[in-house]
């Protein structure tokens, strides 16, 4: 047995020298159906020689088609022995019959058994590709055969558009392309008109000059003139075997040994099958797109949750816990000027530089005059904004902002037009910073970190307030020191005003108790500022004392919002006192993996650095490890679920093309070859779907489109994650193909074909 197989693979051409080509000796075929045994034919003995044109005739049910299926290796037999070129076949397995069909037999069916979605050229080409011919060899041969059957003008026409006679000619051309010594025809003229039928018979007669042609027909008159031999069957037996004319038995016939289909041909067929039926491609594309979307969305969400869990509640100093954030200060503790910020921005891998660093971690509150609407969030540089607005436009003036609002803020969700028509001021200070909301974006999910994006001028102005709040401020009036605070209700709140002259201060009469005789006008005033970064002082003269009656004349306001009064100083002097160059800033790196490179460059420029990722309390490490295990379990369960759902859907899609798989098997394609073609087809579908989804993700990343589901997880996925998800997708497609092939090959090629016709 193994010697025979070895010879088959090594020898390319063998010869039949006289004698029979095909012989049956007491061969019987039985069918088993629900415990009932039916006889296809019984104890048939017959020989077939090369160059014969044998017509097998008989009424329906006589066993002639069954005999033809056994001869062609599409059906097995239960008794007796069938010899192929002198070799016994009773021990043949399905794989042996596949090899037999590839080398010895070509089939022509009543129903043509063509791939209707293929062109004439592709149908004839198919058998040559399955037999391992190279593309260069194929083209010339296919065109010759198409011309031989008279279909040159239809070579690029899909077979679905051909007439019955034309389809049968395609089937004959395909049979000739196999270059097998035996051609079997099962009612090849049954669905044709008389003229087309006569043309097919003449063509088969011509073919029999070089081959053994066996034709099964119920119409003897069509073939009687051309047949060299007529075999009659009745009730599963041969009742007569009449030779009409002798044929040359001594002329030798070449038998081409079928070559294995090459990888190039497998890829060619797989790619062709991917696109040749558009509805099938779209369905498979949608299935794989949904798989890709589910994998990347769930995996990204789990990565996001893991990332947030790893730092949640473990840092008491910073609000923005981005792992790409690095806080910088100069080693000599001096301020960072504009020129130095420009040098920092030129460092590779730095995405953003935030001069007003404190704002990133400072929650601010703005409200409108009536108190009906409010803004509550972290003030950020507009350069940090990356996304697409849900309402409005981007800021164009220094007092305009974009508001990222929480989903639970019904005022901005349900009354956005009214909310954006308001003017907002900072914490009850109507004379201070005033802003307008011109753009809104709605946060989704569990993201509650509202943000206010504004221009640098706004941030610089607000930094004066923040520096003021974080500073120790002492006011000296009449040679006595008083601490000053900056919250509502304190009488020593210091505020800027353009109405105040340089060197002067305008104070409320409510603080006159600090002066002798309750008269502070023309008295000296000193303001000393001391904070983490700097200390400074300002010497002034109290030039005006205001009250409710003269506040509008002196300061240009209707009333002081501080019920206990304030100290107003010149706006420029206020800025010089409180708005300094940055002493601390934050930089954001494009990728956490590049932080070390950036830190090294900053060190060379004279900066101390603090990486936010290193400030996190490690007490949550155990929780993170548990979450990683949970993530793994969830992903595994998701993959299993997606596999079975997608398998049942894809199997239904592929089953619609069972006629194709049956055809390939009849033509000699074995299990391994059919599976590899299916592997390639599903691989291409999966890859196209994956690339499409990644393209959508890139469009979201660069703000071309806005899909929240994608944007919420995009930044947590790395290149390795994309590679991992693609590998999972490919493995799933491979397993689906494997499982489908196992189901497909549980039935014989003929039984599978019978189910489809």
Image (cartoon, rainbow, N blue to C red):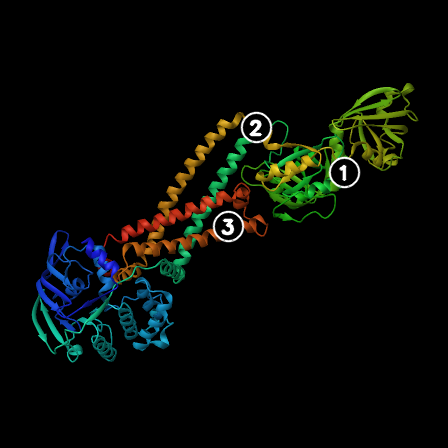
Q: Quadrant of residue 639?
A: top left
Q: Quadrant of the N terminus?
A: bottom left
**In what element is the residue under mark 2?**
loop
Q: Is residue 413 visible?
A: yes
Are the residues flagged by discs 1 and 3 in contact, CB closer than 8 Å? no
Residue to which mark 2 is pinned: 313
Quick one: label 2, few (<14), some, or many (20+) residues within 10 Å? few
Question: Disc 3 marks which residue?
Answer: 694
State the residue in front, 534 or 133. Answer: 133
| Residue at (18, 59) in percent of width and height | 75
What residue is rendered at 64% in x and 42% in y? 350
Q: How many marks?
A: 3
Q: Which residue is mark 1?
A: 337
1 or 3: tag closer to the N-terminus? 1
Residue 603 image point, x, y percent: 67, 34
Question: Within the image, what quadrant is residue 205 found in?
Answer: bottom left
Q: Which mark is residue 383?
A: none
Can residue 372 be seen by looking at this rendering? no
Q: Earlier in the sequence, mark 3 or mark 2?
A: 2
Q: Earlier in the sequence, mark 1 or mark 2?
A: 2
Please provide percent x and percent y for residue 443. 58, 41
């Amino acid at each position: 047995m193994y010697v025979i197989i070895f010879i088959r693979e090594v020898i390319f051409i063998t010869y039949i020298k006289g004698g029979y080509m095909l012989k049956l000796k007491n061969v019987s075929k039985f069918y088993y159906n629900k415990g009932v045994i039916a006889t296809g034919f019984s104890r048939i003995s017959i020989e077939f020689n090369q160059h014969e044109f044998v017509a097998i005739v008989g009424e329906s049910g006589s066993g002639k088609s069954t005999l033809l299926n056994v001869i062609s290796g599409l059906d097995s037999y239960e008794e007796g022995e069938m010899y192929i070129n002198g070799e016994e076949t009773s021990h043949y397995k399905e794989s042996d019959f596949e090899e037999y069909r590839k080398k010895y037999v070509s089939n022509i069916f009543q129903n043509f058994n063509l791939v209707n979605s293929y062109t004439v050229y592709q149908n004839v080409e198919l058998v040559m590709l399955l037999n391992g011919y190279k593309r260069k060899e194929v083209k010339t041969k296919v065109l010759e055969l198409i011309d031989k059957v008279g279909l040159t003008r239809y070579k690029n026409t899909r077979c679905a558009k051909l007439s019955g006679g034309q389809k049968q000619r395609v089937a004959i051309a395909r049979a000739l392309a196999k270059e097998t010594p035996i051609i079997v025809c099962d009612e090849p003229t049954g669905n044709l008109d008389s003229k087309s039928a006569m043309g097919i018979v003449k063509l088969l007669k011509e073919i029999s000059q070089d081959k053994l042609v066996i034709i099964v027909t119920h119409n003897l008159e069509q073939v009687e003139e051309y047949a060299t031999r007529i075999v009659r069957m009745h009730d599963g037996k041969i009742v007569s075997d009449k030779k009409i004319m002798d044929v040359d038995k001594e002329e030798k016939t070449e038998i081409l040994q079928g070559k294995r289909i090459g990888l190039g041909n497998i890829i060619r067929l797989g790619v062709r099958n991917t696109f040749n039926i558009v509805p099938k491609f779209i369905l498979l594309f949608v299935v794989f797109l949904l798989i890709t979307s589910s994998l990347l969305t769930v995996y990204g969400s789990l990565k996001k949750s893991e990332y947030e869990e790893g730092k949640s509640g473990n840092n008491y100093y910073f609000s923005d816990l981005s792992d790409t954030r690095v806080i910088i200060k100069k080693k000599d503790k001096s301020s960072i000027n504009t020129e130095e910020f420009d040098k920092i921005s030129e460092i590779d891998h730095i995405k953003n530089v935030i001069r007003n660093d404190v704002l990133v971690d400072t929650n601010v509150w703005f409200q409108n005059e009536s108190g009906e609407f409010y803004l509550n969030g972290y003030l950020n540089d507009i350069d940090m904004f990356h996304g697409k607005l849900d309402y409005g436009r981007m800021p164009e003036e220094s007092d305009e902002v974009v508001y990222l609002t929480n989903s639970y803020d019904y005022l901005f969700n349900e009354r956005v037009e009214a909310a954006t028509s308001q003017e907002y001021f900072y914490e009850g200070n109507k004379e201070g910073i005033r802003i307008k909301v011109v753009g809104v974006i709605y946060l989704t999910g569990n993201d509650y970190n509202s943000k206010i994006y504004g221009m640098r001028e706004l941030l610089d102005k607000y930094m004066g307030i923040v520096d003021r709040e974080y500073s120790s401020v002492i006011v000296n009036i009449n040679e006595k020191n008083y601490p000053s605070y900056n919250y509502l209700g304190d009488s020593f709140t210091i505020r800027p005003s353009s109405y105040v002259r340089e060197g002067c201060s305008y104070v409320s009469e409510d603080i006159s108790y600090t002066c002798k005789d309750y008269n502070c006008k023309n008295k000296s005033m000193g303001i000393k500022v001391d904070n983490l970064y700097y200390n400074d002082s300002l010497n002034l003269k109290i030039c005006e004392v205001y009250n409710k009656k003269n506040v509008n004349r002196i300061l240009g306001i209707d009333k002081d919002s501080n019920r206990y009064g304030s100290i107003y100083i010149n706006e420029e002097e206020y800025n010089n006192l409180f708005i300094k160059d940055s002493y601390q800033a934050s930089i954001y790196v494009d990728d956490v993996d590049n932080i070390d490179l950036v830190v090294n460059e900053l060190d060379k420029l004279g900066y101390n650095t603090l990486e936010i990722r290193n400030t996190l309390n490690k007490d949550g490490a155990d929780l993170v490890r548990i979450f990683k295990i949970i993530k793994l379990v969830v992903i595994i369960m998701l993959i299993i679920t997606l596999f079975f759902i997608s398998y049942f859907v894809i199997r239904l899609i592929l089953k619609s093309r069972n006629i194709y798989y049956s055809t390939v098997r009849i033509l000699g394609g074995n299990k391994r070859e059919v599976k590899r073609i299916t592997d390639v087809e599903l691989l291409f579908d999966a890859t196209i779907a994956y690339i499409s989804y990644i393209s959508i993700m890139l469009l979201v990343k660069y703000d071309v489109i806005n899909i929240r589901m994608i944007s919420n997880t995009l930044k947590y996925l790395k290149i390795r994650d994309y590679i991992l998800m693609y590998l999972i997708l490919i493995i799933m497609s491979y397993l689906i193909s494997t499982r489908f092939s196992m189901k497909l090959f549980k039935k014989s090629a003929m039984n599978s074909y019978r189910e489809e016709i």
